[in-house]
Image (cartoon, rainbow, N blue to C red):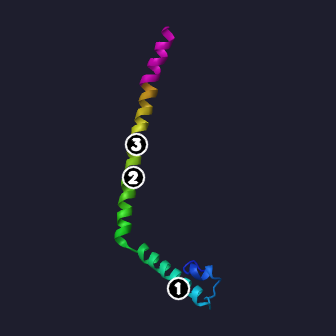
Amino acid sequence: MYLTHPVLLLYEEDIPKNKTSRNYFHQLEEYARAYKEALVDQLAWESLAEKLKSLLNLLVSLNTFFRSFWFLLQTQVVPYMAHYVMQD
């Protein structure tokens, strides 16, 4: 299987003989080449990595906050509410 040549796979590993189809084939190859070039852009990957790092830090912060909140509920609020309900 040609994962590096998906256009050949699309055309069943045979370059079209028809002029119009051959033009489409070459156009698709050019698109694929441009995408490959874009995927090796170091600056784009660094930017994406920074965004993902920020999102992960936000998730860790939220996780810490909700764990603290849950702990507070279990240790402070629920026992107080249970004690309050038992008095009525």
Please report contact status of discs 3 and 1: CB closer than 8 Å, yes or no. no
How far apart are the two marked residues, 3 and 1, measured between alpha carbons? Answer: 49 Å
Q: Residue furthest right?
A: 12
Q: Amino acid at mark 3?
A: Leu
**Which residue is disc 2 drawn over?**
55
| Label placed on residue 62 | 3
- The stretch in magenta equals 76-88
Asked whether, in this view, residue 40 is left or right of residue 4, the answer is: left
| Label placed on residue 63 | none
How far apart are the two marked residues, 2 and 3, measured between alpha carbons? Answer: 10 Å
**Magenta span has 62?**
no
How far apart are the two marked residues, 1 and 2, measured between alpha carbons? Answer: 40 Å
Q: Position of residue 67 (x, y in %)?
A: 43, 37
Which secondary structure is most common in the magenta stretch? helix
**Magenta span has 87?**
yes
All told, the count of numbered labels is 3
Compare marks 2 and 3 and give the one earlier in the sequence. 2
Q: Position of residue 60 (x, y in %)?
A: 40, 47
Compare marks 3 and 1 and give the one earlier in the sequence. 1
**In the figure, residue 20 lies in which quadrant?**
bottom right
Please report contact status of discs 1 and 2: CB closer than 8 Å, yes or no. no
Task: Tell me which residue sits at (38%, 62%) in the image.
Answer: 49
Q: Quadrant of the N terminus?
A: bottom right
Other residues around mark 3 within 10 Å, as few (<14) / some (14–19) / many (≥20): few
